[in-house]
Amino acid sequence: MLFLGIDVGSSSVKASLVNAESGKCVGSAFYPKQEMEIIAVKSGWAEQKPESWWENFKMALKEAISNAGANPKDIAAIGISYQMHGLVVVDKDQQVLRPSIIWCDSRAVEIGASAFEMLGKDYCLNHCLNTPGNFTASKLKWVKDNEPQLYQKIWKIMLPGDYMAMKLSGEVNTTVSGLSEGIMWDYKENKLAERLLEHYGIEADKIPNLVDTFGIQSEVSKAAAEELGISPGTKICYRAGDQPNNAFSLNVLQPGEVAATAGTSGVVYGVSQEIKYDQQSRVNSFAHVNHTQQSNRLGVLLCVNGTGILNSWLKKNVASNADYTKINDEAALSPIGSQGLVVMPFGNGAERVLGNKDIGASLHHLNFNIHQRSHLLRAAQEGIAFSFQYGLEVMKGMGINTQTIRAGYANMFLSPIFRNTLASTTGATIELFETDGAQGAARAAGVGFGYYKQFTEAFNGLKSLETIQPEMNHKDQYQEAYQNWKKVLVSTIN
């Protein structure tokens, strides 16, 4: 028996097959091999065609099955992970009406700020735990205001994972966790955030029906089964945004546990049992995958948009003659603190941790007589790690004290400089595991299918790879470098 996990990212779509009995990943693939296109018609905009997610998934699934040497008919259940906060709109024939406005699009910032002012701090923070911000509901309001004729054709709005489930099953539904990430869930009244939707003039019937995060949500249709080569009736048993799912992938489910990821964007995600919020909404609280009305499990999420995308930009434009391993080796030639060179990584849209300001990426204290390419490459990775620490200081104010960070052995966590800087600046131990979002979604599908009776059973095949301790003998150097970086940041945002 196999469980299939799908992870719809903004760079690629990944498919992983997990053997139910052993809990081990037996086949995995991603597609496309180059990063998916992000359409940016205007500055601050970011869109993708949902149809491309489906087409890339089909290619990834075919390759994963081939890599596993598996029979696709052995797939018993499917779990879906997806890029958060995106907006997909379809008509009554389930046809996409426009490209998806994805997570890093910042066009709705002013709409969310206006709603926060008009609805009031008490309602937004006590009921929704967040400002309406630049989230899915605000993006839909932008469509309503700027594309009114298209808006009238909308039958249902969805998050990216809901769209993939629709393509698999022909059914449209969503989860409480999904609605919470779109700021469309009222925690106080435990229902749809009707007051926010009414303020935006959004009809409640455009919101899909709710299904549980774990459980049989729908079944693969005959048409999709023929397209994919799997059995019709295969159960779709789990769905979650990429960050709650990443936390699940790392067995981060209980209060005080922390997960991190550092792909295109960077996230630290801590679990709390208290319904809390940041007064400035610089970090955000969402329903975690195991949140229920009886047992609160909130994921407090710190997001930094400009993470791996900064490293990728440097590779393309500054170090095109090197792969990432060589970039890391070259960066290691420079000392901690990069001899005063400071890089702000915020070049991928408005940053919530900076109060939804879009300050862009920037370079500071460059000295033509001292600094070389190695300094720039190191300063960039240090800047990413320091931005994590800046956000963790905000999270600490909400009662989350980070002592251990769990992460997958991937993306920026492959870099010794990044992970050593992060561990030594935060003082936290970093535990790296052989897993990813697609594997996590597959294991979660096993829980939703009922094969794993307890969460712990789903992690029998989870392999620990490495543990990074803070470099205590260099603690002062890391702290000095961080304080220099923070001083530049404060002066920039003020």
Image (cartoon, grey):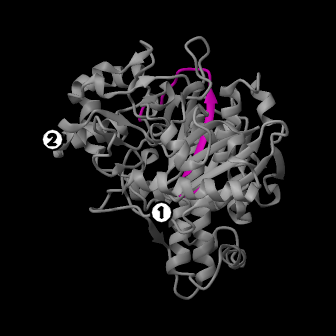
**The quarter of the displayed image where residue 203 is located:** top left
Q: Can the viewer see residue 181 in this picture? A: yes
Magenta residues span: 263-280
| Along the viewing direction, whichever of 148 and 103 lies nearer the viewer | 148
Left or right of 25 in this view: 267: left
Q: Quadrant of the N terminus?
A: top right
In the picture provided, is 364 more to the left or to the right than 123?
right
Residue drawn at point x = 32 percent, y = 57 percent = 44
Q: Horizontal and vertical percent for residue 362?
A: 44, 68
Res 249 seen here: no
Residue 280 at what x, y percent from top left?
41, 35
Element type at marker 1?
loop
Viewer-nearest residue: 337 or 401: 401
Label whose residue precedes the other's in the sequence (1 or 2): 1
Residue tagged by mark 1? 36
* Residue 54, image x, y percentages: 48, 51
Residue type at mark 2? Pro
Residue carrying label 2: 148
